[in-house]
Amino acid sequence: MRVVIKATRDTAGKRELTHERDCRAFLAKIRFAYDTFFSPEEILFLEREGFLVSVQAYIAQSTTFLERPVREQFMLALNAFKAQESAHATTYEHARSIRKIFGSMNAAEYEGAFKQFRECVRSAAETKHLEPLLERASKSLTGNTRVIEQYTGFLTHTDFVPHNFRVVGSNIYLLDHSSLRFGNKYEGWARFLNFMALYNRELEVALSTYVQVNRAPEEYQALQQMRIYRLGEILCYYVRTLPQSEGDLRALNIERIKFWSSLLEAILNGTSLPESCIEAYKKVRDSLRSTEEKVRQQGLH
């Protein structure tokens, strides 16, 4: 029997493992999307000799998400997002305790977090030139506070990307439960679509068009604002890596910053990133990745 073992003696690591377990247990308790989402079987969870150890069953899948036909990817993703949207804080008797388990974000908190991302990016010499772009992004979020707040209170997976779940038949097994929280219903969508802008452009366009055509204009507006928010987050993430990286890795992270800032600009302009820009980035990225990283990426998505 294949298993996945997580072990840590770090305080923050223990807190994350415990939080993830609490989230799994609470999802089962509220029967969240019980016909769509599943969790790997927990085999062992104990603390010994200073280590907190979590052992879960390994979930095998016949093919990766991105190897499936685009139509199948579309339906799997759409059903997953609809399942998340079905869980709203106000629908549960113990809304306060649920929010305590998962955490929550409202429009003001999204705006405050983006201000921190903006400060992070402009504090680095290599990315000060992005300040005008981030100012536009900040104004967009501020100008759409009402729309962002209108669609908060939904349980959303903030890191819903293929390496964090497995697909078996039509069932989705969540591998990461620590990224669940109550927030804007499109925060998970935004992470997924930004990811697919690089890995599967056809799927990104299909899902974005679905929201634009089939839902209220305010919902598409909320999706775009969440994409802006998540791009500010990823820019800050890579800026923070620069002081600790060197050589090809540093060059790669600078290229990543260029790419994600280009996508941010395209979204603010209401346009699509040119395919030539995506392909050029992939070529540079692949030339700068280490051998170990190339191996790790195989079959990841």
Image (tube, rainbow, N blue to C red):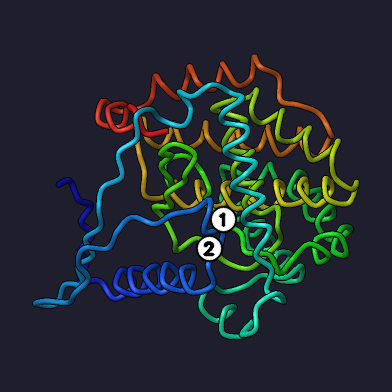
Residue 3 falls left or right of residue 226: left
Task: Check disc 1 and give the amino acid type.
Answer: Thr
Residue 87: image quadrant is bottom right
Which is nearer the N-term, disc 2 or disc 1?
A: 1
Mark 1 surroundings within 10 Å by alpha-carbon count, few (fewer than 14), some (14 through 19), many (20 or more): many
Q: Choose between 27 and 9: the one closer to the eye.
A: 27
Q: Where is residue 117 drawn, in percent x and y?
A: 62, 58
Residue 61 falls left or right of residue 161: left
The answer for how far apart the CA atoms under marks 2 and 1 are is: 6 Å
Residue lying farthest left?
49
Residue lying farthest front?
35
Mark 2 surroundings within 10 Å by alpha-carbon count, few (fewer than 14), some (14 through 19), many (20 or more): many
Compared to 6, does 16 lie above or below?
A: below
Residue 207: image quadrant is top right
Q: Where is residue 214 drawn, in percent x and y?
A: 84, 39
Residue 82 falls left or right of residue 126: right
Q: Residue at x 19, y 67 (%)?
A: 44
Q: Residue at x 62, y 32 (%)?
A: 74
Q: Choose between 157 and 253: the one closer to the eye.
A: 157
Q: Quadrant of the C terminus?
A: top left
Residue 242 falls left or right of residue 71: left
Q: Where is residue 157 drawn, in percent x and y?
A: 56, 56
Cβ atoms under marks 2 and 1 closer than 8 Å? yes
Which residue in the protein does label 2 denote? Answer: 180
Which residue in the protein does label 1 denote? Answer: 158
